[in-house]
Image (cartoon, rainbow, N blue to C red):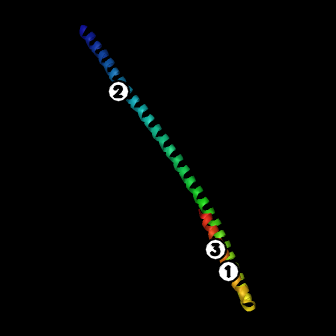
Amino acid sequence: MAIYFYIFAAFIGGFILAFIIQSLALAKIKKEYKSNLGLLESERLKKETAQKENQFLIQSGDAALLTTKDKLAKAIAHIKLIDNDILLLQKSNEETEMLLAKGEPALHDMKLKLIEANNTIARYKAQLGEK
């Protein structure tokens, strides 16, 4: 009878020991699981932050590109206007030169000096505008 008692006590002791080992192993697995969940959450937040930053950079680049295209279009329009003005001025100068050359040579020379003076003034204004 004592043998049955020792066998039963050993069985209960083994069962309790196995239960403790399994509980410790399970607690370790739960701890690793929570750690992995925290790591995954951290990586997900980093990924979202990186995506937001990338989206911001893309939008900033697009805005800069649109601004640059707008400035380029304005500059091209301004250059065309200047070209048209130059052509009109050249045409006017040629017509005036032909009329003056036919009529009065002294007036023609004064007109050429006036044109040269206007060109000099325009150059000085352009230099002052650049500075």
| Crowding at mark 2 (Cα within 10 Å: few <14, some 14-19, many 20+) | few
What residue appears at the point 55 percent right and 49 percent down from the top-left corner? 56
- Distance of mark 2 from mark 3, alpha carbons? 94 Å
| Crowding at mark 1 (Cα within 10 Å: few <14, some 14-19, many 20+) | few
Q: Label 1 amino acid?
A: Lys
**Taking the image as drawn, is residue 93 in sight?**
no
- Distance of mark 1 from mark 3, alpha carbons? 10 Å
Find residue 106 and report its horizontal and vertical position in percent: 72, 87
Left or right placement of residue 93 versus residue 38 in this view: right
SS of the residue under disc 3: helix
Task: Tell me the tag on residue 25.
Answer: 2
| Crowding at mark 3 (Cα within 10 Å: few <14, some 14-19, many 20+) | few
The residue carrying mark 3 is: 120
The picture quadrant where one finds residue 111 is: bottom right
Is the residue 37 above or below the residue 26 in the image?
A: below
SS of the residue under disc 2: helix
Look at the numbered discs 2 and 3 and tell me whether their residues touch, using CB distance below 8 Å: no
**Which residue is at the front of the view, 14 or 87?**
87
What residue appears at the point 37 percent right and 28 percent down from the top-left corner? 28
Q: Label 3 amino acid?
A: Thr
**Which residue is at the front of the view, 114 or 130?**
114
Find residue 73 and report its horizontal and vertical position in percent: 63, 66
Q: Label 2 amino acid?
A: Ala
SS of the residue under disc 1: helix
Task: Tell me the tag on residue 113.
Answer: 1
**Mark in the foreground, 1 or 2:** 1
Find residue 95 and report its horizontal and vertical position in percent: 72, 86
Residue farthest along the bottom direction in this orientation:
102
**Which residue is at the front of the view, 9 or 54?**
54
What residue appears at the point 30 percent right and 15 percent down from the top-left corner? 13
